[in-house]
Image (spheres, grey):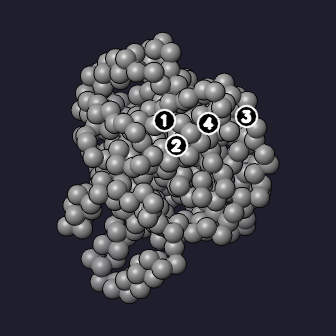
Amino acid sequence: MMSNEQQFSALVLDGQAQNALALARSLNKMGVTVTAGGNSRYLPAMLSKSTGDSYVYPNERQDYHAFVDDLERHLRENDYDAVFCVTDLMTTILSENKELLEATGTAIGVEEWQTHQSANDKGLLFEAAADIDVPTPWTVSPGTIDDIDDITDERSTSVVVKPRRTTMHVGGRGYSSRLSGENYVSMDEDLAARYRGLVGDSPAFERYPPIVQEFIDGVETMATVGLAVEGELLMHFQHKKFRVYPPSGGIGAVRQGTWEPKMREYTERVVEMLGWTGPLHVEWMKTADEDFYLLEVNGRYWGSLALTINSGVDIPRYHFQHLTGEPLRIEDNHGYRTDVRQRKLFYTDILWLRENLSNGNYSALVPFTTSFFTTREEFLSLSDPLPLLGVLPRTRNVLLGGGVR
């Protein structure tokens, strides 16, 4: 519980994201007054009864500097105890400008810039992880796109080409680091040619060339998420995915808690290596011999945050306490629930169904429809129904074949 005499307030950015809604609901439940922010109006978090006000800011993807200037002004004019965000791009922007923004007297809920880069840049991450006792795939990080010619002869296995960062900003604009095709490259393919084809003419890839990594033929991808302070993992939750979109490896349309002590132990080593403070998501590939290979670290809140909270691990609550200097009274959370199965209907399961139907797999309608009766939805709530209105406009775009940011 928060102090009885003091009223706390928080600003939750990325109001379009469903995990931002989960975060806002968690903070509001503990008595925090929440303002939802976004680069347009009527976003899901803004429509929630858990938020009392809204803040519309310049589009952080289109004008980085205008956004930072406006946020600094907003923080100076309003009395927030802490600021939260959930997307990769926003986390990067806040981390890079953390000193400037915290000069307003507001705690910014992201890691320091140098530590943030060491986790979110896969080249730096796997270079550091090679020195700890954690299984990692063979990884090479080209300094420039042309360095791929020298790497071609080094590999002895099929590989995947991965962006160094999930999102980047170059010249004041934000970019999603999507490759222009399938990123798996078999041994009989020309790696250099495929690499250049995947990179295309993106200015972001010119600055941050993608890495080349050994393909790990695993059983399934899993993740350990949690809250760390100065390199110690204080709370954690683990989940596995069902109905993944895209099928080659992506977001789980349906997810459920799991319990893997070895994966937790490996995660603790990664957290200690990074010296991490704050929330983070560590993804692993489970192999047939019951081992786990490190795939990536995301130094931010994760897409399955609602599942984490609903399974008994309310990380935003304790993150807020840490940011505001409240004593952390964390109980042993090894007994979290693993029987909660949760569905991300908007938009991952819709995209999963759309792809299956476009490929003629009409039997996919059965598990998709059954989930309405057997699986808890990601954010739909009878007691808080209005956020649904915030996803309907983009749902139409997805159904008609468009994407969603």
The residue type indicated by label 2 comes to Asn
Which of pointers 4 and 1 indicates the residue nearer the eye?
A: 1
Q: Residues within 10 Å of mark 3 (few under 14, many from 20)?
A: few
Q: Give the side of residue 227 with respect to residue 171, left or right.
A: right
* Label 1 vs 3, first from the N-terminus: 1
- Residue under the point 69% across and 48% down: 236
Q: Which residue is mark 1?
A: 33
Mark 2 vs 4, N-terminal side: 2
Sooner in the amino-acid sequence: mark 2 or mark 3? 2
View extreme (front): residue: 5
Question: Picture quarter containing residue 246?
Answer: bottom left
Q: What percent of the width, then of the height, locates residue 216?
A: 58, 59
Of labels 1 and 2, earlier in sequence is: 2
Task: Determine whether the residue tagged by mark 4 lies in a helix, strand or loop.
Answer: helix
Q: CA distance from mark 4 to mark 1?
A: 15 Å
User: Label 4, on which residue?
Assistant: 319
The mark closer to the camera, 1 or 3, is: 1
Which structural element holds mark 3? loop
Residue 383 in the image: state x and y as whole percent: 45, 60
